Every structure is written in C-alpha cells, then in structure tokens.
Amino acid sequence: MRDSTFAAFMLTLNTLAVVVRDEKKAAKWYKEKLGFTVVDRYPHWHTVRPRGSSVKIHLCPDSPPERGNTGFAFGTKSCARDEAALRRKGVKITTPTTKEDWGTYFTFADPDGNEFWVFE
C-alpha cells in the first residue's frame, strides 16, 4: 500500500469528545437548542451530530478524559488494515483492533503520549 493512499482514506475526522455533567441532559440540549441529531445512546455516554455532518460529538459525563486520551477519533473502512499499516510505520498502537457491541476500534499514540481513536 502506498503512503499517499493510506493518508487519503485514513484521516477522516470521526468524533470529538466533550466532557459534560449529564450526557442525557446534554444530548437533549444539543438536540433542542442546536438542532443536532442524537446518534447513539449508551448507559455511560451519548453522541450527537450536527445535521449534514459526519463528525460526531461524544458527550462524556462528568469526568475528564483518561490520561493521554485526546477524545479525537478518526474513521476508516478497516481497522485491522490501518492498524497494520501504522505498525509498519513504527506508530505505537496502544489498543489493538477490538470489536465491541458498539463498534470496532483501535487506538494509537503520538510521540508525546497523546492517544487517538480509529473507528470502523
């Protein structure tokens, strides 16, 4: 795989995290006040998205992101393929490709320890 092809499909911004006191109340506010669509509702977090946008806002309730977790997420069509490509480039993978009920993802870190998510 050529590097230019990898960068073109990999770096699509997917999600930004925002810390909130109550994800349910926050999702309601984003929907009613800003006209956002509520995309996901899980017991500990919700996501919302501006109409017409592919970027979601992950509403993280009442706690700061974990150490190193930037809350930024990129989208891809294949986590396994992109994880392997990043490993070949020497990028530190902090969580290998993992499948959960809510999606498939992996995380990687930059040289300063900032972690980024990649979702399929």
Image: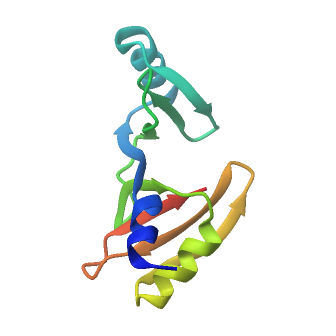
Place residue 55 in its image quadrant: top left
Position in image of residue 118 (x %, y %)? 50, 61
Q: Residue at x 48, y 29 (%)?
A: 48
The furthest residue to the top? 32
Residue under the image location 42 percent in, 24 percent down: 26
Instruction: Please report the residue visible at 60 percent of the width from the left and 33 percent of the height from the top.
Output: 40
Q: Residue furthest left?
A: 112
97 is higher (above) or lower (below) than 23: below
Looking at the figure, which quarter contains the C terminus?
Answer: bottom right
- Which residue appears farthest toward the right when viewing the image? 101
Q: Is residue 119 above or below residue 19?
A: below
Q: Nearest the camera: 12 or 27? A: 12
How many numbered marks appear? 0
* Rendering coords of residue 23 (x, y %): 48, 31
User: In the displayed structure, does residue 7 sit left or right of residue 105?
Assistant: left
Relative to residue 71, is residue 7 depicted above or below? below
Q: Is residue 95 left or right of residue 90?
A: right
In the image, residue 30 above or below residue 107: above
Task: Depth check: give the residue in front, 117 or 28.
Answer: 117
Q: Nearer the viewer, residue 63 or 12?
A: 12
| Residue 106 placement: quadrant | bottom right
Give the image's coloring scheme. Answer: rainbow
Give the residue displayed 38% in from the left and 45% down from the top: 17
